[in-house]
Structures are given as structure tokens and as C-alpha cells.
Image: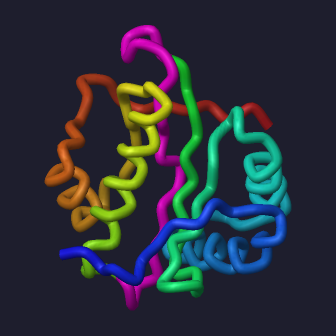
Amino acid sequence: MSNPDINFRLAEFIDIDPLMELVQEFYQFEQISFNEKVVKAFTALLGDDQFGFIWLICDRDRPVGYVALTFVFSMEYHGRCGFVDELYIRESYRGQGIGKQVFSFLEDFLKSQNMRSLFLVVDHWNARAESLYTKLGFRQEKRHFMAKHLD
């Protein structure tokens, strides 16, 4: 199932207000602290495409979500790879195949950039998202994602 009215528009600085509205919704849903550091990180990504891109997911012209794709470099995965750092689709648009459209779009983009791998992180409690990602071909690696915050 695919929604023909859904399209992807590269976010620009002019989109910061509607983007931050979506980010705040996502952070509230995920129970992540939203603060000025978040806004600075999004602004940095909007300003330098060597780190990645943010696309607004639009129903015609109206933003209904966003996806932030960042880049990593991995020897094991043969060079530059994509990392879905954040993906948010408003609740009223979930379950309509838009997630599949997002990943098809991202895979086409990464292939056009000669990248061979796409990574993401999913919360342990989000079985619905994990089910979608599994259906799309994502598999759990033998390693655990770990992080250390350097504040």
C-alpha cells in the first residue's frame, strides 16, 4: 500500500519552525528531552550536507513527518553508510504504508550515492516499528549499539 500524495522535500533553514514542531511531537512520544541542544543539532545538519540530510515527509504540501539521515564511515560495511537517526510520522498517518515509502526513498538515495548499508536504532518497546523494519529486511546485528555521552 502506497499513498500517492506523499512526497519528500529536502528540509532547508526556512523549514525550521514546522520541523521543530514535528521534532517536539516525536520527542514527546519517545520521552526524549527537547532543549536548545536539539535545535542546534538540527540547525547544524541543515547547514552541512556532508553530515547528512533531513527530509520533510509531506502529504501534498503539508509536513506530516520527517526523516533525518546521517552518514557514518565503516570499514566492516565497506565505506560510507546511511544512518536513520530519526524518523517520525504523525500518528494519524501511521499504518498507511508511509514508512515503507520512506525506506524505499532512502534506499534509492543511498544507492545513487554508492552507499551499501543503512542502519537504524529501534527502541526495545516499539514492537510495531521493529516489525516494519524486519519486513523491510533489517536484521539485528550480533553487536549491541552502545553510547557514551561526553557532556
Considering the whole magenta stretch, tell me its main secondary structure.
Answer: strand
Q: Image point 71% across, 40% down: which residue?
A: 49
Going 83% across and 70% down the picture, which residue do you hit?
14
Is 42 situated left or right of 81 in this image? right
Colouring convention used in this rendered image of the protein:
rainbow
Relative to 145, is 149 on the left or the right?
right
* Residue 27 belongs to magenta span: no
Q: Is residue 49 visible?
A: yes
Q: Quadrant of the C terminus?
A: top right
Q: Is residue 121 left or right of residue 63?
A: left
Camera-side residue of 86 and 145: 86
Residue 124 locus on image (x, y percent): 31, 54
Which quadrant would residue 97 be assigned to in this image? Answer: bottom left
In this view, 49 is above or below 58:
above
Q: Residue at x 39, y 90 (%)?
A: 92
- Picture coordinates of residue 138 (x, y %)? 23, 42
> From this viewpoint, is residue 123 visible?
no
Looking at the figure, which quarter contains the N terminus? bottom left
Q: Is residue 64 left or right of residue 36?
A: left
Number of labels in the image equals: 0
Taking 76 as reference, is 88 above or below it? below
Start-end of magenta stretch: 74-93
